[in-house]
Image (tube, rainbow, N blue to C red):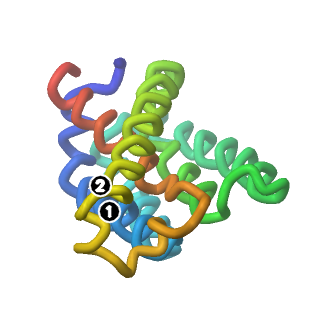
Amino acid sequence: MSIDWTTAAWFLPFVAPITVWVAWSDMASMKIPNKAVLALLAVFVVVGLVALPFGEYLWRYAHFGVVLAIGFVLSAIGGVGAGDAKYAAAMAPFIARPDFMPFMFLLAATVIAAFILHRLARASAIRQRFETWESWTRREFPMGFALAPALLFYLLIGFFTG
């Protein structure tokens, strides 16, 4: 991965609690709050000024625009939920352009792991502990449970290997 460890170090303390909030909320209510999306974007807007060279910082807004446009189309045709599309767009500026494909592999692995963990938890006693969670009874998968950790893992990998 090409993310620098200092960039990851700047973003991690602010992004980590938002990722927990998003994953938890999506499992509990099958919704990613707009406030969480805006909070993540605000972290990039503010911390990105310090964490990234200014030219790169500005270019990363293009990542947001491209992913937002793709997410809008996918949401319109029923491919993804609107919250998932907005959250993915807010995540996009954190990902360095050369890391696009490695991040996609990381995201794919995270989706598979999150799906398996969710289905195992749904079939176990954990479900009784959080019996009001909507994701236990819905056919759809709470994609925030995979998107949020993928961003966290990306930053952690950058921190420890960058």
SS for callout 1: helix
Rendered position, 29 above or below 96: below
Q: Is residue 157 left or right of residue 101?
A: left
Q: Residue at x 25, y 54 (%)?
A: 16
Q: Distance from label 2 to label 1 (Cα)? A: 5 Å
Q: Residue at x 51, y 27 (%)?
A: 104
Of residues 3 and 108, the one drawn nearer to the viewer in this rendering: 108
Q: Residue at x 74, y 50 (%)?
A: 79
Task: Give percent across and percent down for residue 57.
Answer: 45, 41
Q: Give residue 3's quadrant in the image.
A: top left
Of residues 22 and 159, the one drawn nearer to the viewer in this rendering: 22
Hey, what amino acid is under mark 2? Val
Residue 46 appears anywhere in the view: no
Mark 1, residues whose alpha carbon is within 10 Å: few (<14), some, or many (≥20)? some
Mark 1, residue position: 18
Q: Residue at x 45, y 35 (%)?
A: 112
Pointers 2 and 1 in contact (CB under 8 A)?
Answer: yes
Q: Which mark is residue 15?
A: 2
Q: Which mark is residue 56?
A: none
Task: Give percent across and percent down for residue 50.
Answer: 28, 47
Hey, what amino acid is under mark 1? Ile
Mark 2, residues whose alpha carbon is within 10 Å: few (<14), some, or many (≥20)? many
Rendered position, 74 above or below 140: above
